[in-house]
Image: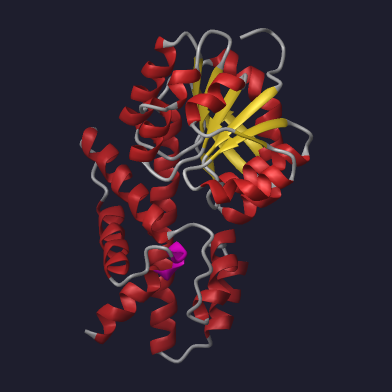
Amino acid sequence: MTDEVPTRVGFLGLGIMGSPMAQNLIKAGCDVTVWNRTKSKCDPLINLGAKYKSSPGEVAASCDVTFAMLADPESALVVACGDDGAARGMGPGKGYVDVSTVDGPTSKLINAQIKETGALFLEAPVSGSKKPAEDGQLIFLTAGDKSLYDKVTSYLDIMGKSRFYLGDVGNGAAMKLVVNMIMGSMMTSFAEGLLLSEKVGLDLSVVVEVISQGAISAPMFSMKGPSMVQSKYPTAFPLKHQQKDMRLALGLAESVSQSTPIAAAANELYKVAKSHGLSDHDFSAVIEALKVKLKD
């Protein structure tokens, strides 16, 4: 890539996270070209001034740097390396930044395919869900080509509040999986506490308030707690994605023979919640899996 900041930006994947991220780029005055498997999801961004191409390869060919936010490793791989994938449009002078949450081997495979074209690659999974994405408050966990990182920092700063460069490809994926493994385990423990509180007659709104003021305070508890008390789970981070990340984190742990019994138990609860049709609800709906166990 040239020493100049890339001026034409592509964005692939316009779901819960990708759409507000791309929207923030457009609102900041960036020249953005979008693609999504379901074309209708592109329309609001096109109305804001984005251009549209009919395949990831066409987006990559027309842009200096292309961002991708896909739901899982399989989708990320197909969009990057499939028949009409972004790699088809990549080449020297271009960069590919995958902000999806995938496992290390998938990220390394995408990296290899992109590098074969002469382009640069950066993995940059994000910590944060729907609201931080809308507010430009995401945390980017990046790894890969440092020169590409240096060139896209202005875009990362539009979409996020902080960014970390972690070295070789795979480190960003590992960091994200560790963060989401801890988050998923914390949520199941919080759910257990709420249900125990209810069983012994405590006021759940007071429980949430007490937790929010103590040493175990976490933004997640104060944000999710009030709606969980009402058995409402507006989707900020789908439960099916949380379970996918738990599964990938457990696989990472297995690869280095690290015991993770708490995360393994939490993962089972997310699987139970999925089996009860809660995949597309927010991951806080895992509390419903514990209600089922109590009824049983």
Residue 139, given in percent of the width and then of the height, sits at 59, 40
Is there any visible trace of residue 128 in the rendered image? Answer: no
Quadrant in the picture for residue 80: top left
Q: Is residue 20 left or right of residue 125?
A: right
Q: Give the residue displayed 56% in from the left and 51% down from the top.
A: 40
Provide the residue span drawn in magenta: 281-285
Q: In which quarter of the image is residue 196?
A: bottom left
Determine the residue positioned at 52% across, 34% down.
Answer: 54
109 or 59: nearer the eye? 59
Is residue 283 within the magenta segment?
yes
From the viewer's perspective, tell me whether residue 121 is left or right of residue 78. Answer: right
Report x, y in % for residue 136. Answer: 69, 45
Across and down, in percent, residue 291 comes to 33, 80
Q: Can residue 209 be seen?
A: yes
Q: Which of 53 and 282 is in front in this view?
A: 53
Relative to 13, say whether 263 is above or below: below
Quadrant for the N terminus, please. Answer: top right
Looking at this view, name the residue that lies furthest to the front. 54
Residue 208 lies in magenta, yes or no?
no
Specify the quadrant that holds the C terminus: bottom left
Establish if 192 lies above or below 265. below
Task: Count up the numbered dots.
Answer: 0
Report the residue at 40% width, 60% height from top.
239
For the point 50% across and 75% down, the residue is 228
Coloring scheme of the render?
secondary structure
Examine the residues drawn in magenta and state their main secondary structure: helix
Near-viewer residue (216 or 48)? 48
Q: In this view, does 282 lie above or below 172?
A: below
Image coordinates of residue 163 in percent, x first then y, are 61, 33
